[in-house]
Amino acid sequence: QVQLVESGGGLVQAGGSLTLSCTSALVRTRTMAWYRQAPGKRRELVASITTGASTNYVDSVKGRFTISRDSAKDMVNLQMNSVQPEDTAVYYCKAEAPPGLSAFWGQGTQVTVSS
């Protein structure tokens, strides 16, 4: 059974930092991504990283968030710096789907930024 286990969410003050981690055997072979969904809003892509370590970020987090992967530890991390109240959301780890295969999602972890 495929699992993506997220950790690291919580409450943080504006301007602070938080690191989210996602552990899965799929980290070794898949493009991995972090998405987020705020109340009343659509789920959006925050950042992604390929197996070759190419990264992509939504404009609102560029320069503040960093996605990284450690395939030896089956882990992908999202380092969140200078967080703002608008970063408050449930953050989901996703193993993207190569052609012909299924994508997989983690259960989500809540990040709340207080002003």
Image (cartoon, rainbow, N blue to C red):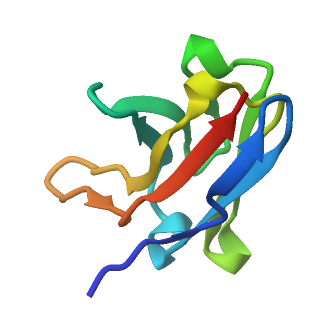
**Is residue 68 at least partly visible in the picture?**
no
Q: How many marks?
A: 0
Residue 82 in which image quadrant = top right
Residue 44, given in percent of the width and then of the height, sits at 37, 28
**Is residue 81 at least partly visible in the picture?**
yes
Classify residue 87 as left or right of residue 33: right
Tell me: residue 106, above or below residue 13. below
Comparing 17 with 25, the one in front is: 17
Residue 67, given in percent of the width and then of the height, sits at 69, 43
x 78%, y 26%: residue: 64
Quadrant of the drawing holding the N terminus = bottom left
Residue 36, given in percent of the width and then of the height, sits at 43, 38
Residue 88 in which image quadrant = top right
Residue furthest front as drawn: 115
x 75%, y 37%: residue: 66
Comparing 40 with 63, the one in front is: 40
Tell me: residue 45, above or below residue 22. above
x 18%, y 58%: residue: 101
